[in-house]
Amino acid sequence: GAVVSQHPSRVICKSGTSVKIECRSLDFQATTMFWYRQFPKQSLMLMATSNEGSKATYEQGVEKDKFLINHASLTLSTLTVTSAHPEDSSFYICSARDGTGVYSPLHFGNGTRLTVT
Amino acid sequence: AQTVTQSQPEMSVQEAETVTLSCTYDTSESNYYLFWYKQPPSRQMILVIRQEAYKQQNATENRFSVNFQKAAKSFSLKISDSQLGDTAMYFCAFAYGGATNKLIFGTGTLLAVQP
């Protein structure tokens, strides 16, 4: 079945550095990908919607300049956490929609645990 | 704005018994979709069941079924014959047609199936 690959699964970085997380759809083309953030024992909070070939749409309260999203191809979206700080430590999950309708299957990556020291 | 509320942070059920997880939502949209996702300790999000709002018939998937009450904006999940592998975080989610078709998640219910 359809698979979404998210890499890396874990990353530790120093405060002030940038980290890039990749989300790939392996056997389907994803015109839309979503990036979520999940704190321990909490829900998934939508950060932004990534559309291939256009600028990402960010949710209210999400800093566009801190969380850079690029969706350069139909199979790859990247999230870059710039100038990371300890408060950015979290679990980040991407998802990709296989199709264009709201009822199209939404496939999730396995997530990336980011720890900023 | 669309909101999804799960009022039960944690629940426990004995193996082979039935459990119902609650979910309410608020929206002004007329055409929308509701989902239940499962997140086991592996953190992988797994679709359990989904329901189109315009369908009155409740969706079922093997041991999983929903009770969709559109007027009350309620969408509960019933798990029959609970199994140890059902232990997970369960999220109710809402989506509606539009430019982005984004999925909004509820706060989650941690279900523990006891042997």
Image: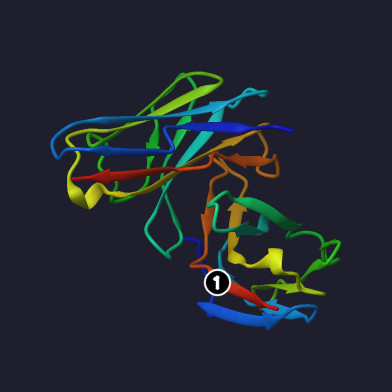
Image position of A3 (left or right of A93): right
Q: Is residue A45 left or right of residue B75?
A: left
Is B96 drawn above or below residue A8 in the view shown?
A: below
Q: Nearer the viewer, residue A49 or B64?
A: B64
Indicate the colouring scheme: rainbow
Residue B30, relative to residue B115: is it above or below?
above
Looking at the picture, how far across and down is residue B87, in whole percent?
63, 67
The residue that appears at 77% across and 59% down in the rendered structure is: B54
Assign a secondary structure to mark 1.
strand
Give neighbour class at mark 1: few <14, some 14-19, many 20+ (Cα, 10 Å).
Answer: many
**Left/right of residue B98 with respect to residue A28 in the rendered view:** left
Q: Which residue is mark 1?
A: B110
Residue B31 appears in the figure: no
Quadrant (top left/top right/bottom left/bottom right) for the C terminus of chain B: bottom right
Q: Residue at x 53, y 78 (%)?
A: B10
Residue ranking furthest to the left? A16
- Across and down, in percent, residue B5 comes to 52, 72
Residue farthest front in this picture: B115
Measured along the vertical axis of the image, is residue A58 above or below residue A28?
Answer: below
Chain letter for the residue marked with disc 1 in the picture: B
Question: Does any portion of residue A46 appear in the rendered image?
Answer: yes
Disc 1 residue type (three-letter): Leu
Q: Position of residue A68 (x, y in %)?
A: 30, 31
**Left-right relation of A93 to A2:** left
Mark count: 1
* Residue A55, quarter of picture: top left
Seen at 38% across and 61% down, the residue is: A40
Q: Quarter of the image holding residue B90?
A: bottom right
Give how far across and how far down residue B50 sits, in percent: 73, 56
